[in-house]
Image: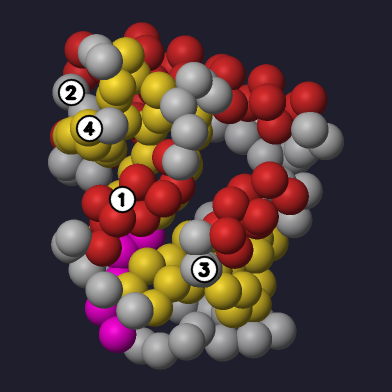
Amino acid sequence: MNIRNAVPADIPEIMRICNSARDYMRANGNHAQWINGYPSEKLWRDDIAKKQCFVCEEKNHLCAVFAFILGEDPTYLYIENGQWKNDLPYGTIHRLGSDGTCSGIMEKCKAFALSHVSELRADTHEDNKIMQAVLERNGFEKCGIIYIEDGSPRIAYQFSR
C-alpha cells in the first residue's frame, strides 16, 4: 500500500471514501459522528492545500484518507479524567476513513506518521467502538477526554514509542 499526499483531483474519491466510512459507522451504531456534512469537501481541500491530507492507495485504487497534522492541536490543550503520556512534540491522525476494501489501514497510517514524529495522538467519539478497538490494537492508550471545537467530548488517545 502506498500513502501519498492527496491532490485536488482526489476529492471525488475522498468524498466517496467518507460516504462509505459514514455508512459503515451508521451500520455499526455510531450515529453521532461525521454528521451535518462533516468532513466537508472544503475541509479536505484546506488539508490538501496545507499538505496534511493523505490517501492510501493500492493498485491505483484509493481506499482510505486521513489528515496527519504535525504540531500542537488546540483541542488537546485541555484534557480531563486523565492526562497525556508526555508533553513531547506530536502528530495527530484525524478524520481517518476507509472504504473497507483494504485491511490494516491504521497500522499503515501509524507507520507512516511515525516516520515523521515519535509521538502520535488521536481522538474518537464514544460511540465509535470500532475506532476505539483499532486504536487500542495499534498500541494507542486512552488518556482522557478532550473537547472538539463544537464542545462535544471525544476519547483521547496517545501512542508513544
Residue 105 horizontal/vertical position (percent): 43, 40
- Dominant secondary-structure state across the stretch colored magenta: loop
Circle number at residue 140: 3
Q: Mark 4 or mark 1, which is nearer the start of the sequence?
A: 4
Q: Mark 3 or mark 1, which is nearer the start of the sequence?
A: 1
Magenta range is 88-92
Classify the position of the C terminus by image quarter: bottom left
Residue under label 2: 7
Q: Mark 3 or mark 4, which is nearer the start of the sequence?
A: 4
**Residue at x 78% of width, y 25% of height:** 27
Q: Amino acid at mark 1?
A: Phe
Vertical comparison of 91 with 3: above or below: below
The span from disc 4 to disc 3 (Cα, nearest Å) is: 23 Å
Mark 2 and mark 4 in contact? Answer it, CB < 8 Å.
Answer: no
For mark 4, does the 10 Å Cα neighbourhood hold few (<14), some (14 to 19), or many (20 or more) residues?
few
Vertical comparison of 21 with 13: above or below: below
Q: Mark 4 or mark 2, which is nearer the start of the sequence?
A: 4
Q: Amino acid at mark 2?
A: Val
Q: Mark 2 or mark 3, which is nearer the start of the sequence?
A: 2
